Image: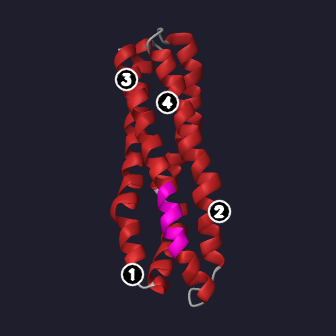
Amino acid sequence: MTLDLFAYACLAIGLSSALVGGVFQAFSDFVMAGLVRAAPSGGMDSMQQINRTVFRSVFLAMLLALVPVMLAASVAAWQLADAAARPLVLTGTAIYVVTVLGVTLFGNVPMNERLDRLPRDGSDAQAYWHTYGIVWTRWNHVRTLGSVAAAICFLLAALAAA
């Protein structure tokens, strides 16, 4: 991998992370707000369907694929990048792994799984739906900010490596 290829890789990773952040931002900004405003059974059903559909999406593939790609870029940064790009790549990778992958696996997904097991018409489900909307969205804000911060790191690394 040459330095130019490394810079282009950082650019692609940064733009991909920004796209992931954009999807998260849309959910935080208006998707969850609309679902929470709907009747609880309707909002819950819609979110359950969204959560089932995401498993077959380009979005999830990109979100997950970015982790090994960023880790590979971090290894390459040790060999190819100058002093300015290296810490940006390492920082961007760490931010993404913790705030996007970690929060997804240990925050949002467990909440989605619990929501999926609840019958939409029960009082427990309706009480959980209110909490779900608030807590899930807060965790999603973390994922949004983490994706954007990682994107900034990789885009700055691309500039530094160019």
Q: Which residue is drawn at 53% across and 35% down?
A: 95
Q: Quadrant of the C terminus?
A: top left
The percent position of residue 29, horizontal first and vertical second, equals 34, 59
Q: What stretch is highlighted in magenta?
A: 130-138
Left or right: 68 in relation to 4? right
Left or right: 17 in relation to 95? left
Q: Which residue position holds label 1?
A: 38
Quarter occupied by residue 148: top left
Q: Which residue position holds label 4?
A: 92
Q: Distance between the residues labelled 1 and 2?
A: 22 Å
Mark closer to the chain start, 4 or 1: 1
Decide: few, some or many residues near mark 1? Use Cα within 10 Å; few <14, some 14-19, many ≥20.
few
Q: Does 95 appear above or below 42?
A: above
Q: Which residue position holds label 3?
A: 156
The percent position of residue 107, horizontal first and vertical second, equals 61, 56
The tag on residue 110 is 2
Secondary element type, mark 2? helix
Mark closer to the chain start, 3 or 1: 1
